[in-house]
Image: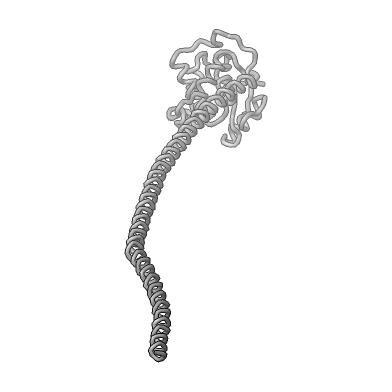
Amino acid sequence: MLNIRSFFQNIFLFVKNLSKRVYRNCVVMTTGACVFAIVVLNSTSFGGGGRNNTNVYARTLDTESESEDEDVSENTETEMNGTIQFGLVNSALQEQSITEHLSAIGSSKEEETEEAVADKETNENLISYQSNDLFSEDNDNDVALIDYSESDYQALLRIVEAEATGLDIKAKILVANVVINRVMDEHFPGTVEGVVYSREGGSYQFSPLSDGRFYNVIVTDTTIEAVDRALYGEDYSQGALFFAARKSASNANMSWFDRNLTRLFEYHGHEFFTFR
């Protein structure tokens, strides 16, 4: 009996110990299984949904990257178009500015040319007025000093131009004065043509008729003015009836002048004389 009881007690203890060991093993296995299941489920969720999420995230990144690339491309294209348009506008503005500048320069040059012409005309007028103020005496004559025809007038113009070519207006008035003085003097012909074409000893009194200059001159406006002023009383001659340019005259002629005439004055190379 004791042996059987001991046998059963041993079996019970064995079973009990076995149960505890099995229980622990079961608990461990169960725990391990749960942990494994959790790990598997999590890894499955991460591997599946996570991969999907990763793919979605990657696609999102790709989409965003493409969108950014498109935005960058659009921005770049917009900037380039803006730059091109700005360049075209800027070029147009520059061309317009250059055109306006050239137009302004052209207008400025035209104005300067007009001003220069106006100044020249003003200066010429001033010279004319200064000549009148400098040389003219009180002259309110409305009637010429001598009677003259058109042919007389033309002869006077030519002899003055020939004798005083290139000289100032006073020099030309002086030549006209001498001719007019002769017309009014009893020792000479009573007309301008008679004085201009007169001869002494077979020679013309005025050398331009001998050498042909009288017939070839071109009468200038200054000469016309000088003749008109002399005809209507402007006189600086002091009554001179002769004149000669000593540098171009012959020694014989100048000797005769010095011996027989009274020298009055000299002006621009011409010496003026009258009877003694």
Q: Nearer the viewer, residue 118 or 145?
A: 118
Residue 70, relative to residue 107: is it above or below? below
Q: Residue at x 33, y 58 (%)?
A: 56
Quadrant in the rendering for residue 246: top right
Relative placement, left or right, of 77 versus 173 is left
Residue 258: percent from left, percent from top: 65, 30
Q: Nearer the viewer, residue 127 or 79?
A: 79
Inspect this view and state whether residue 205 appears: no
Q: Residue at x 45, y 28 (%)?
A: 218
Q: Nearer the viewer, residue 9 or 26?
A: 9
Q: Nearer the viewer, residue 92 or 125?
A: 92
Q: Quadrant of the C terminus?
A: top right
Residue 262: percent from left, percent from top: 67, 24
Quadrant in the rendering for residue 252: top right
Inspect this view and state whether residue 228 appears: yes
Q: Quadrant of the N terminus?
A: bottom left
